[in-house]
Image (tube, rainbow, N blue to C red):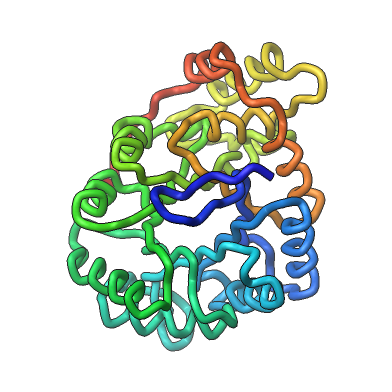
Amino acid sequence: MEKNQLGTSDLFVSKLGLGCMSLGTDENKAKDIIKSAIDEGINYLDTADLYDFGMNEEIVGKSVKSIRDQVIIATKVGNRWNNNQTSWIWDPSKAYVKEAVKSSLKRLQTDYIDLYQLHGGTLEDPIDETIEAFEELISEGLIRYYGISSIRPNVIRNYVEKSNIVSVMLQYSLLDRRSEESILSLLRENQISVVTRGPLAKGILSENALNKIPKEGYLDYSYDEILELINNIKGKLIKNDRTMTEVSLQFNLANQTVASVIAGVSTIHQMKENVKAIQGNPLTKEEYNLLKEWSKQNLYTSHR
């Protein structure tokens, strides 16, 4: 599978990454999916300490321990479970980041994390302190690079200005083009890569589209507006073996700032369908422009 450089780092990530959050807690099933994904050429595994109380990291670690140098592990930090694991609090403090990384390393059964990401961010965070923590972890050899996973434009701008992040994980799809407002161009100008999540918008943009559209709509789309978009795509862009999933994933990749598209799966079949879609034909300029014409240029109204 084709690989793209992540920012200015020496990490080259498969253009389709495996979102591990939805793998579940059946260890054998999850391991089979991860192994199959790697066999298909996926080398980028996205997890977080938050998922399944750390069990997700444990499964990823066990699955790739024997081939650690062949994969890129990305995990996240910042959401801190309370003692009885009924809720979590946001904690981007230097002390917590440096404490949490040790637990992630232990669960992942590795000496280093390729990409360590802040799992959110607010304007009230002690950003200088958080950045200092990541920089020290690099100096200590515990992480190779760091990034953030955020949908807040002003938080992203702060990190672009003050830190050495190599990537930003953004929610991005045909139904959620909010990051086009200014963030994608800013990241491109600063040679910071985008890793996208939610490319299928909770399945609305997949083969099961008509069964997945919420009656209340999605973001600022009504049910009827989503239906119109899907009908346009199916009637005018889907030909031969092309699928809705292919069009949706290729829309993400059509933006040059996007290095990898993260798609979550719970079965090997879903993963293989995504692989087939990502290796399909790239969108032509005309197709890309049509998709942008049919969909909305959403704007952030909150989470600034």
- Residue 21 visible in image: no
In the rendered image, the quadrant that contains the C terminus is top left
In the picture provided, is 214 more to the left or to the right than 104? Answer: right
Front-lying residue, 248 or 129: 129
Whether residue 249 is situated above or below residue 137 in the rendered picture:
above
In the rendered image, the quadrant that contains the N terminus is top right
Front-lying residue, 105 or 77: 105
Residue 102 drawn at (x, y percent): 44, 84
Whether residue 131 is situated above or below residue 227 in the rendered picture:
below
- Residue 87 visible in image: yes
Name of the residue lying farthest toward the bottom: 83
Q: Residue at x 56, y 82 (%)?
A: 107
Residue 162 placement: quadrant: bottom left
Residue 199 drawn at (x, y percent): 56, 40
In the picture provided, is 185 more to the left or to the right than 14? Answer: left
Name of the residue lying farthest toward the front: 10
Whether residue 301 is situated above or below residue 119 in the rendered picture:
above
Q: Residue at x 35, y 80 (%)?
A: 140
Residue 160 drawn at (x, y percent): 25, 49
User: How many numbered dots are placed on residues in this image?
Assistant: 0
In the picture provided, is 128 more to the left or to the right than 89? Answer: left
Whether residue 37 is situated above or below residue 77 in the rendered picture:
above
Q: Residue at x 74, y 67 (%)?
A: 30
Q: Residue at x 60, y 60 (%)?
A: 45
Residue 25 placement: quadrant: bottom right
Residue 181 drawn at (x, y percent): 32, 30
